[in-house]
Image: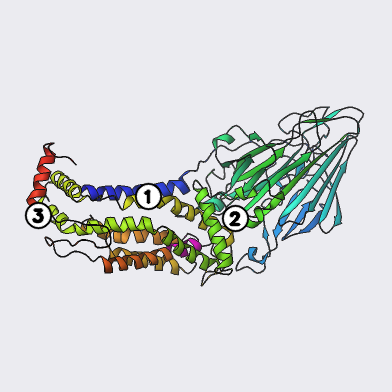
């Protein structure tokens, strides 16, 4: 393999490895399960246990569980008297129904409906990491709330004992996927009492749920987020920050969230009653690993993680008959960009829930373009919008593509002399490389000139990859024979057609500077890799790749027509008229050999 071929091979390998690391390699895992902090109960020590309660706890008789339902804008929420948290949060749009399962109506964002301590919007008033104290305003972590259906959009929960009266009102505020939560606590004693109020969102997924396939990250891969000022802290399971328990940072008025590719649960703090310790909550995150010791290993498919994001307010001391009120907005729903832009009044900038990766600034621009195309050119057809966007990018990036064409044409004109050098120095690779360098220097040709424009385009490629793979706009959207643009082609037509198109593209113009064995390997290896990857990638991304490949074939056919290949070895290479390239043939192969000898003696400059 000559030096040029080696550089090309290394360059391609680095691109592939870099892309794999960028999307799939930045993950960590933890094999240490975390302990479950104990909770106190109003009927302690007897209670109905959760799934993960230690063996030996005897369940008593509790009052029947009661629920309250809220019909909101594009959702229906069901809350329980046990914890005043969500048992279900249904998305009622038809597009979020489970495809192929007409009996499964509405997508439920609740993944822990049967575990009281992990129900989203659950509110507690004690710090579970500290022992109870006589000064605590509330004695218990769990108690029976009394639900009241105020109207179709509002539920009220109350609890009262000899120390505190708590009223929690949850209502739909008219915005899509939004709930407004207001909780007040009143001190009923004649002495000052302390409380620490927190409200949380939860999600549970098994390792099988979040396991990706070749080339695709699972849409259920979950991250935990704290958004403050212009910064978003994102943590995945197994992050070092979780090794000591909860990750915590101060939060002003943006959000704490649990998110996956297409959906998110975000808690936005609003104003709280003023107090001497301030009223700004902390954003706290934690991912707990759960498996059955003795029966499961941490990495078993059925083992999983509980993802937690909560707002924890500073400790407050209430005087006799004093009341503190806490208000939040909860956004539980799909990451629809136009909805997120106006969610919670617009300020929390919930559109940052959409993680577009390192090149997010490029991806956001591409999103605005494809959204405009969808609205004004393709009139609501997302598949056609992808095709139009691909064509537009080809046109905009043509100046860079033109540089690649110029470099390819220049290398093609030198092919007779390169073939002669390969034959002349077939037994002396060092001399051949030196002669090649002298040949390129003499004709002012850069063999890597076609790679540099491609390198400049890489941020756009990666940004487009992230955009098409994570856009909820394609979720359950039909196009041609695809039932869902966000899912792989279940008929495998797209991967096969894409692989065939890439083979055609390789046959039209084989890689320059490679011997026949290397050309054959590239002709079958790259299409094969992308065909296998497309078995698991979203159809939206496949539509882009196939359109781009077909446009590439068209471009190469036009290049072949206007700048045909040179004749047999030794023939004069005509100037590439119109391409801005003039390549003069060498007079004799001996001159290149002399240049190589001079280089070896250190007498020639490159």
Q: In front here: 300 or 575?
A: 575
Cα separation between marks 2 and 3: 63 Å
Q: Which residues are magenta?
A: 536-545
**Mark 2 nearby-residue class (10 Å; few <14, some 14–19, many ≥20):** many
Label 2 with label 3: CB-CB less than 8 Å = no
* Screen quadrant of the C terminus: top left
- Asked which quadrant contains residue 336, the reply is bottom right
In the image, residue 321 sits, relative to residue 306, either above or below, namely: above
Please say which color scheme the image uses.
Answer: rainbow
- Tell which residue pokes out farthest to the bottom in this image: 480
Q: Is residue 274 visible?
A: yes
Residue mark closest to the camera, 1 vs 3: 3
Image-based side of 109 in relation to 68, left or right = left
Residue for point 47% across, 69% down = 491
The residue to which callout 3 is attached is 587
Q: Is residue 336 visible?
A: no
Q: Secondary structure at mark 3?
A: loop
Earlier in the chain: of badge 1 and badge 3, it is 1
Q: Which mark is residue 239?
A: none
Q: Secondary structure at mark 1?
A: helix
- Asked which quadrant contains residue 219, the reply is bottom right
- Count of numbered badges drawn on the protein: 3
User: Per the image, is 490 magenta?
Assistant: no
Residue for point 56% across, 62% down = 372
The residue to which callout 1 is attached is 455
Residue 403 x %, y %: 32, 55
Q: In front here: 298 or 389?
A: 389
The residue to which callout 2 is attached is 262
């Amino acid at each position: 393999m000559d030096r040029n071929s080696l550089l090309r091979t290394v360059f391609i390998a680095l691109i592939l490895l870099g892309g794999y690391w960028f999307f799939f390699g930045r993950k960590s895992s933890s094999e240490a399960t975390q302990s479950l902090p104990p909770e106190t109960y109003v009927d302690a020590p007897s209670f109905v246990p959760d799934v993960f309660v230690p063996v030996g706890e005897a369940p008593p008789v509790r009052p029947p569980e009661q629920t309250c339902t809220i019909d909101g804008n594009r959702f229906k929420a069901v809350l329980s008297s046990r914890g005043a948290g969500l048992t279900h949060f249904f998305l009622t749009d038809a597009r979020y129904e489970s495809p192929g399962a007409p009996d499964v109506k509405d997508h439920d964002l609740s993944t822990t409906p049967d575990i009281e301590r992990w129900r989203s919007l659950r509110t507690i008033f004690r710090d579970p990491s500290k022992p109870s104290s006589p000064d605590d305003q509330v004695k218990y972590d769990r108690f029976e709330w009394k639900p009241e259906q105020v109207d179709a959009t509002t539920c009220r929960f109350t609890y009262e004992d000899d120390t505190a009266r708590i009223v929690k009102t949850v209502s739909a505020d008219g915005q899509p996927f939004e709930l407004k939560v207001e909780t007040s606590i009143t001190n009923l004693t004649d002495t000052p009492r302390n409380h620490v109020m927190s409200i949380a969102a939860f999600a549970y997924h098994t390792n099988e749920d979040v396991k990706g396939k070749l080339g695709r990250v699972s849409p259920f891969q979950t991250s935990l987020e704290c958004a403050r000022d212009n910064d978003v802290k994102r943590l995945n399971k197994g992050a070092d920050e979780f090794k000591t328990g909860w990750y915590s940072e101060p939060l002003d008025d943006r959000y704490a969230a649990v998110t996956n590719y297409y959906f998110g649960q975000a808690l936005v703090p609003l104003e709280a009653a003023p107090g001497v310790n301030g009223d700004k909550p902390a954003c706290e995150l934690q991912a707990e690993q759960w498996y059955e010791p003795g029966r499961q290993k941490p990495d078993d498919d059925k083992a999983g993680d509980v993802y937690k994001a909560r707002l924890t307010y500073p400790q407050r001391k209430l005087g006799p008959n004093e009341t503190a009120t806490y208000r939040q907005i909860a956004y539980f729903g799909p990451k629809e960009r136009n909805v997120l832009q106006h969610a919670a009044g617009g300020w929390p900038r919930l559109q940052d829930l959409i993680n577009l990766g390192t090149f997010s600034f490029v991806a956001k621009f591409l999103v605005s373009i494809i959204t405009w195309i969808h609205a004004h050119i393709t009139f609501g057809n997302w598949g056609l919008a992808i095709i139009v966007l691909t064509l537009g990018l080809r046109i905009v990036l043509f100046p860079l593509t033109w540089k690649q064409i110029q470099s390819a044409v220049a290398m093609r004109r030198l092919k007779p002399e390169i073939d002669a050098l390969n034959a002349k120095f077939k037994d002396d690779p060092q001399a051949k490389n030196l002669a090649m360098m002298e040949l390129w220097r003499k004709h002012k040709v850069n063999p890597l000139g076609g790679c540099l424009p491609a390198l400049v385009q890489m941020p756009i490629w990666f940004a487009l990859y992230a955009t098409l793979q994570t856009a909820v706009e394609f979720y359950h959207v039909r196009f041609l024979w695809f039932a869902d643009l966000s899912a792989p082609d279940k008929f495998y037509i797209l991967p096969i057609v894409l692989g065939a198109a890439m083979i055609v593209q390789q046959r039209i113009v084989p890689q320059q500077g490679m011997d026949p064995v290397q050309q054959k390997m590239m002709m079958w290896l790259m299409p094969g890799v992308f065909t296998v990857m497309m078995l698991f990638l979203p159809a939206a991304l496949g539509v882009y790749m196939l359109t781009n490949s077909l446009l590439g074939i068209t471009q190469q056919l036009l290049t072949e027509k206007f700048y045909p290949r040179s004749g047999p070895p030794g023939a004069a290479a005509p100037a590439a008229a119109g391409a801005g390239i003039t390549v003069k043939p060498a007079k004799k192969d001996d001159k290149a050999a002399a240049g190589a000898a001079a280089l070896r003696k250190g007498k020639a400059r490159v």
